[in-house]
Structure formats: C-alpha cells, structure tokens
Amino acid sequence: MSTGKIEQISVVGAGILGHSIAQRFASEGFNVNLYDSSKVNLLKAKNNIFNNLISLSKSNLLKSTPTSIFKKINFFEGLSRAVADSNLVIEAVTEDLELKKIVLQQIESAVCDECIIASNSSSIIPSEYNSELKIKSRVLGTHFFNPPHLLPLVELIYSHCTSNYVKSEMESLFTNMGMHPIVVYKESPGFIGNRLQFALLKEAISIVQEGISTPQDIDIVVKYGFGRRLSIMGPFEVFDYGGWDTIEAVYPNIIGDPVPQEILEKVSQGKLGVKTGEGFYKWDPINLNKKQKLINDVYTYLEKKVSKQ
C-alpha cells in the first residue's frame, strides 16, 4: 500500500531489473511510469510483467488482481513526460557509468527540485555519478536483487551529500512495502550483497584452478549443502549454530590467516553461539525452537521440490 509523500514513481529503463522494479511498486499500490527508449524493450516489459503477475496470482501472492496491478503501470517512450510528475525516479539503465551520468542529468532537468533521484546499480557508488548533478542532497543509490518483484531486499547507498529527509523517506518507503531496506554505511563498490557473492565466486574459481573440483560439483555442493541454510540464515547465524570455539579452532587451517578479533572476543566472553545461548545473536529457547522449526520446514520443502531435479 502506498504511504507517505511518495505516490508517483518513475522507473527509467525497462530491462531485466527495471520492469521488475516497476512491477514491485505497482503491486504495492503505487502509480508507476516505466520509460525506455526502445519500443522492443517496452513490449518485452509489458509481456514479462503481465506473465509474472499471472504466475504470482496462481500462487496467491498478489494483493489485487493481475489486471488491476498492470493498469497501475504506464509505459513511455519519452523521458521527460515519464518523470515530470514523479516524487521518486529510479534510474535502472545498464551498468555503464558514463551512460548513467547522462541519463541522471536528463532526469534532473525534467523533475521538480523535491523529487528524489535514485540510481540502481550492483556496484557503482553515488559519488561516482552525483558530481554531475546540481542537487546532490536528493540523490542516492539503490541495489535491488534480481528479480526485484520476488526478492524483498534492497540495499540503500548514500553519499555524504544525501539529506536526512531522503534517507528517512526511502527507508520508510521500503519498510512500508514489506521489504528489507539495508543501509550500506560506507560507499564501497559491490556494497554488501555482491561483495559476499564475489568472495564466494573468487574462492570457487580458486578451487577449480587448484584442481580440487569442477564447476559443476562446486554448484552441487552449494545447492544441496550449505546453500540451503543460506535461504533462512546468514553466515553469522550459521556459525552461531556451529559454535565460535569450533570456528576458532579450524579457522587458521582452512583460511590460512590469523583468527579475526571479532571471533576471539566472542570466545573469550564465552559467547559461543547456540550452545551458550548467545553469540552474535541471543538464543533463548522460544526463539531457538521457532528457528529450528523454520529450518526443518524449509529443508523438508526443498528436499521434496529440488533434490530430484
């Protein structure tokens, strides 16, 4: 449901991420203008959005009918008309810094001074593109995870110029949509999610280069092993279960580096994780039982749905 001061949203770029972002907002009751310079891309976007909505409707995952949500989206080939009346414009063109700079300047020249401007990227930080803009305080970076209409996480990346008003509006917007907005405290290429994913990729490639395994078997290890945990637990939760004393013991042998101070502190404090009731999280019996039930339910579901594929 649309709330707050942001009612009209424009998405610039109707590609893989852009059309899905537009669908996400429309599904939450917002009026959305979706722009692309390519008629072909707009046609693909229309078809993809409607097919996505039909699929979600069959799974009872929509708050309204596919048709009513689809009607919330207007499609434009003209940029100025698409963004003129919006409170928020999300630029979602390809990962090309120079192109983003050009498009963002075009957006700024067409919107009112109060309009918030976001650039969606998986790696480019705001200070790399907002130097070309006149009102830097209203600019931020977003990183929606693909596909945005299904994945509820969005990273928010602020520059030192981003105003507190913009920060508050954006965090409230996504929270009210039932999403999980995570603020990246410092500008860092790749932000949080992609730094984690590329760390895994780097290690996977090293394993192949060292002749330890193949790409196919590595994927099997992730899909049918620890990857299942990661659908419901992050790394700090996972190792809270494993026990930080155990992690301290095996860390140097696996990583080849000294044990990080954060782990040493937990061990010295006796905060070993689930076994002591506290690690990076507090584990009281009620929360632990809830988490264990969720783990069992998800593992059982995945075993039935995925293991035979």
Image (cartoon, rainbow, N blue to C red):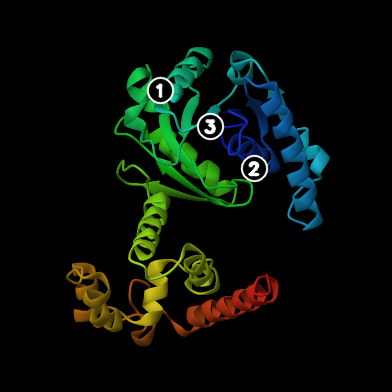
Kindly identify the residue that appears in the image at 37 percent across and 75 percent down: 239
Residue placed farthest to the bottom in the image? 275
Does residue 304 lie above or below 202 as drawn? below
Nearer to us of marks 2 and 3 is: 3
Mark 3 and 1 residues: CB-CB less than 8 Å, in contact?
Answer: no
Assign a secondary structure to mark 3: loop
Q: Amino acid at mark 1?
A: Glu
| Amino acid type, label 2 | Arg
Q: How many marks?
A: 3
Front residue of 165 and 16: 16
Q: Nearer the viewer, mark 1 or mark 2?
A: 1
What whole-number distance in Å separates the C-alpha atoms at marks 1 and 2? 27 Å
Gap between marks 3 and 1 measured at Cα: 13 Å
Q: Considering only order in the chain, which callout, 3 or 2, is on the residue closer to the N terminus?
A: 2
Quadrant in which the N terminus appears? top right
Q: Residues within 10 Å of mark 1 (few under 14, many from 20)?
A: few
Which residue corresponds to mark 1?
98
Q: Which mark is residue 227?
A: none
- Where residue 47 sits in the image (x, y, percent)? 76, 36
Task: Tell me the SS state at disc 1.
Answer: helix
Q: Which residue is pictured at 27% across the width and 83% down the height?
A: 245
Residue 271, placed above or below residue 58 = below
The residue labelled by disc 3 is 92
Relative to 14, is 170 above or below? Answer: below
Classify residue 61 by image quadrant: bottom right
Q: Residues within 10 Å of mark 3 (few under 14, many from 20)?
A: many
- Density class for disc 2 (Cα within 10 Å; few <14, some 14-19, many ≥20) is many
Q: Name the spot of residue 124 as percent of width and height, x first.
A: 38, 36
For residue 162, say whether it is visible. no
Could you say which is closer to the camera, residue 236 or residue 206? 206
Which residue is labeled 2 in the image? 24
